[in-house]
Amino acid sequence: MKTVAKITTRRLLHRICRPRRYFLAALYISMGGFLNGYDTGSIGSITEMPYFQRTIGILSPSMRGLTVSFLLLAGALPSLFAGLLADRFGHLRIVLSGALFFTVGAGLEAGAVNLAMLLVGRAMVGAGEGLYLGNLNVYICEIAPKARRGTLVAMPQACVTLGTCLGYFTCYGTIRTQGDIQWRLPFIIQAAGGLLLAVACCLLPTSPRWLVMRNRREEALRNMKRLDFGHDEIRHDLVSSEEHLPQVSWRRIVDLFGKKYRFRTSLALFILGMVQLCGIDGVLYYAPTLFTQAGLPADTASFVATGVSGILMFAISIPAFLLADYWSRRAIVTIGGILLTGCMTIVGALYASDSVSNDSGAASWVIIVLIFVFALAYVSTWGIVGKIYASEIQPAHNRATANAMAQALNFFTNFLTAFITPIFLARSSSGPYFLFAGLTCTTLVILWLYMPETRGRSLESIQEAFRPPVQKCRKRFENRVCN
């Protein structure tokens, strides 16, 4: 027993000290997820900073919602064609372009002297994220061995939570400073991060699967070796692949909805669109407002929202992404959906029954705890599995295009959530929670019926037998009746 423990410990230390190069590549390009999370964690607090309001002005609830969510709206359009561009030029080149857009946009935000200049900067940041977010997930999916794919594709989401946490803490620290640096520093940090992401794209190897699709097999083999692929992975999943990349054109988008690919395209669109309508962006962007509404003093609410929630979300995301390949995709969706629906329903019921008082009574603390549980449940379940699943269920020649379309829908539903939350909360304390609970429950039921399991299967083998669970149950029932 001691010998086995020593061997296991030795292997673990070896993996930590000498990680595989595909792991390092995934970690480096996950900087894109960090930047997305950093903006999420900082922009809501920035709009409430005194020096921001002196320079830009005090924003109404609707204008604040537009300013916060404008990035998401701007990201939806470029995300639509980011996949087509990636099929033509490669994932890393499009991620590089997105990183440069992001850097210039963050620079404009940092130097903004009025609201118009700030919105232009946020539009450029959104366009950059629209170009790179979907493609970095596809890139990681294609360089990951099947046994580690869930963990590696979940890495950007773990970096999102790290970025959110550091965004919270940056704003919590800078709000105590004097001068415009109070709100400009977070944007400066984002611009520096965008440059680092651009550098990463120049250093990382091109996706071997993309090279194989373009009949550049010798270069693909060299990149596989650079990424430390195992011999069996090279021979079975890549070298034996017979798929070729069809001509890149807008016709490809129409083909995604043809009879052969309609189901998996619709499933990818549904899962990346609907997971955001559970209300997570309302919680992440406006956490201080939610805690203040629950009865906490403004200063306490700011501390709880920035410090405690940021640390907890990042802490739980680490085991969640490390264990992503040990739980089935369906189990993660089911557990997460039940927790998210339950939290939103109970919070809405407490507000609807007038159980919440301004003196921070028991109901107020129940709401605060449930908001924490909701955020932690999301980052450890739906936040991880959605992007993994949408990438891996697509065939190689459609993967970038379909995932980019799903990411565009994700941007749009993010925008809706971020835009309507402050307006809705100003009119009804319980309504937003019941709305998000209903949408989450609907999503859970549909995914439980139509989401095939993919854990532990190679990308190529997933395509060989892709049928929804409800179809399998129907066929099994028909066979029993016939027998």
Image (tube, rainbow, N blue to C red):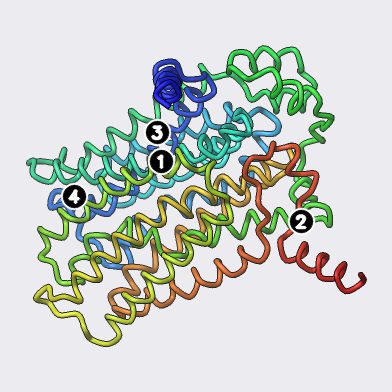
Mark 4 or mark 2, which is nearer to you? 2
Find residue 158 and name its label. 1
Which of disc 2 and disc 4 is earlier in sequence? 4
Q: Looking at the picture, how far across and down is residue 254, in whole percent?
A: 78, 52
- CA gap between label 3 and label 4 equals 20 Å
Q: Amino acid at mark 2?
A: Arg
Mark 2 or mark 1, which is nearer to you? 2
Pick out the residue farthest to the right. 482
Quarter of the image holding residue 126? top left
Q: Is the residue 229 above or below the residue 245 in the image?
A: above
Q: Is residue 3 visible?
A: yes
Mark 2 or mark 3, which is nearer to you? 2
Which residue is the site of mark 3?
A: 104
Find residue 455 and name its label. none
Label 3: few (<14), some (14–19) or many (≥20) C-alpha neighbours in 10 Å: some
Which residue is the site of mark 4?
A: 52
Q: Amino acid at mark 4?
A: Phe
Find residue 467 and name its label. 2
Which of disc 1 and disc 3 is earlier in sequence? 3
Which of disc 4 and disc 3 is earlier in sequence? 4
Q: Looking at the picture, how far across and down is residue 33, in whole percent?
A: 43, 39
